[in-house]
Amino acid sequence: ATPTAVMVATGVGANNGVLIKGGDALEMAQKIKYVIFDKTGTLTQGKATVTTAKVFSGMDRGEFLTLIASAEASSEHPLAKAIVEYARHFHFFDEPSSTKDAQNHGQQSKSFGWLLDVSDFSALPGQGVQCFIGGKKMLVGNRKLMTENQITIPNHVETFVVELEESAKTGILVAYDNELIGVLGVADPLKREAAVVIEGLMKMGVNPVMVTGDNRRTAWAVAKEVGITDVRAEVMPAGKADVVRSFQKGGNVVAMVGDGINDSPALAAADVGMAIGAGTDIAIEAADYVLMRSSLEDVITAIDLSRKTFSRIR
Ligand code: ADP
Ligand code: MG
């Protein structure tokens, strides 16, 4: 392709909300053999909703939700936002109307006045969050987070979590003061175009793969809905880049599509990194393509554009 053709294609991309960072990226996309999709926020809407909140200790429900929301309030993770939102609604409907009025007339932050003070907060990528509330350790996250902190998961709790996972939900475990106190179930619907795009890629001879930090059961349940048959689950953030490299073996050209901070090493490792426009800045920086409309259809747009621009000189 001539420099003009590359320039034109880059312009066509930009007009369609596909930002291409350079001619090499444009040329590489035609050769893509595998497209590895992150799950949360990429295949799914990243608009998680809490569907279940079960308290396993004797703790009051409002108190339980306050603790969790306080722990998650400093996290940027889509799961954290869903949890805080759920707790906020609970409090809004639960509290006396006088406080409600007072809060509505106050600053926006006032509506979060019920959150507790948190110290030593840390977000543990691929696991959850940890902090101290009232001098006691609070953990919100997956099984790995619990096991690494020596929290025992009783059988009846494990059964409950498995049921959530088999229905494509993410089970979030909550421990306070070294005891497992409850579980949340979070649903994150697929993007509407996801299944069609997966089908389209396969018709183009491109193999779709899912990679996620989420657990196996949830990952497979979501994969089944979207039509993906190659799933790498329970992958730690650093591991996503290794997954990319494993697919590159034998010289395969691999694309990675992701939105999160935890996807950026994989986006950088891929031959073609594609960031979801609605994603984090770090992912956008690491990528070769930015899909401004955040639509998965543009993965196909990008490959098509490259194929059309370079087909003649192959
Ligand atoms: P994905 O690869 O699907 O984008 P992540 O790597 O961000 O997922 O997270 C993997 C898992 O870690 C989540 O499914 C969840 O169980 C847990 N997790 C991560 N961050 C949080 C958080 N802020 N609160 C609760 N759980 C979390
Ligand atoms: Mg993600």
Image: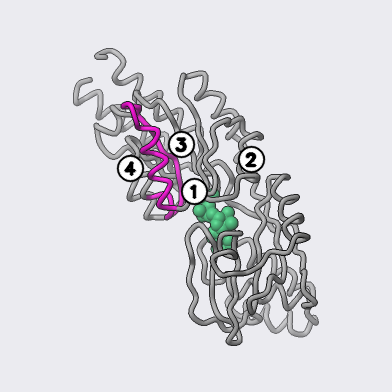
Q: Is residue 301 magenta?
A: no
**Mark 4 highlights which residue?**
269
Q: Nearer the viewer, residue 217 or 193?
A: 217
SS for callout 3: strand
Q: Nearer the viewer, residue 146 or 185?
A: 146
Identify the amino acid type marked 2: Val
Q: Earlier in the sequence, mark 4 or mark 2?
A: 2
Label 2 packing within 10 angstroms: few (<14), some (14-19), many (20+): many
**Mark 3 highlights which residue?**
36
Instruction: Tell me if 53 is positioned left or right of 105 in this view.
Output: right
Identify the amino acid type marked 3: Ile
Distance, label 4 to label 2, CA atoms, is: 25 Å
Instruction: Tell me if 17 is positioned left or right of 71 in this view.
Output: left
- Write the residue at 53% across / 60% down: 127
Distance, label 1 to label 3, CA atoms, is: 13 Å
Q: Nearer the viewer, residue 64 or 29?
A: 64
Distance, label 4 to label 1, CA atoms, is: 15 Å
Circle number at residue 265: none
73 up-or-down from 307: above or below = below
Q: Earlier in the sequence, mark 3 or mark 2?
A: 3
Which residues lie in the magenta part? 237-264
Nearer the observer: mark 1 or 3; the answer is 1
SS for callout 4: helix
